[in-house]
Image (tube, grey):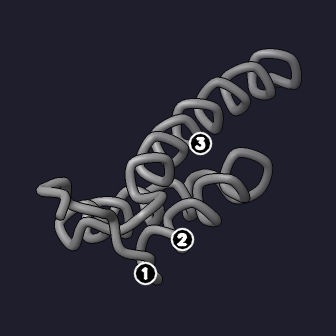
């Protein structure tokens, strides 16, 4: 027997991953925090893809602010 803990498949990790991926391209300010929340819950339940969803959620929020600052600097009145 292995003493190694295996990660469970679950909805929170997968939801975090999907929210993080979609949030990079669309609605990053909404889906980014959701990915972070679901990723944190998934990490506490030791589910697959939770860390990836958490990281993608952070990246989607950062990319949203970078995009908005570039957009506003180009189209400023």
Q: Residue at x 60, y 64 (%)?
A: 19
| Of marks 3 and 2, the one in the foreground | 2
**Element class at badge 1:** loop
- Drawn side of residue 20 relative to residue 4, left or right: right
Check disc 3 and report the residue beneath it. Answer: 60
Q: Quick check: 25 above or below 72? A: below
Check disc 1 and report the residue beneath it. Answer: 10
- Drawn side of residue 5 relative to residue 48, left or right: left
Check disc 2 and report the residue beneath it. Answer: 14
**Which mark is first along the chain, 2 or 3?**
2
**Element class at badge 2:** helix
Label 1 close to label 2 by CB (< 8 Å):
yes
- How far apart are labels 1 and 2 at the CA level? 7 Å
Residue nearest the observer in this picture, 71 or 66: 66
Q: Residue at x 56, y 53 (%)?
A: 29
Count of residue discs: 3
- Drawn side of residue 46 relative to residue 13, left or right: left
* Screen quadrant of the N terminus: bottom left
Q: Position of residue 8 (x, y in %)?
A: 35, 74
Residue nearest the observer in this picture, 45 or 6: 6
Q: Residues within 10 Å of mark 1 (few under 14, many from 20)?
A: some
Q: Quick check: 24 above or below 73? A: below
Toward the left, the furthest residue is 3
Residue 27 is marked as none
| Of marks 3 and 1, the one in the foreground | 1
- How far apart are labels 3 and 2 at the CA level? 16 Å
């Amino acid at each position: 027997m292995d003493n190694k803990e295996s990660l469970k498949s679950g909805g929170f990790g997968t939801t975090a991953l999907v929210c993080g991926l979609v949030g990079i391209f669309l609605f990053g300010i909404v889906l980014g925090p959701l990915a972070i929340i679901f990723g944190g819950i998934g990490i506490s339940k030791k589910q697959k893809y939770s860390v990836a969803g958490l990281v993608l959620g952070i990246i989607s929020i950062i990319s949203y602010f970078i995009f908005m600052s570039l957009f506003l600097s180009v189209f400023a009145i």
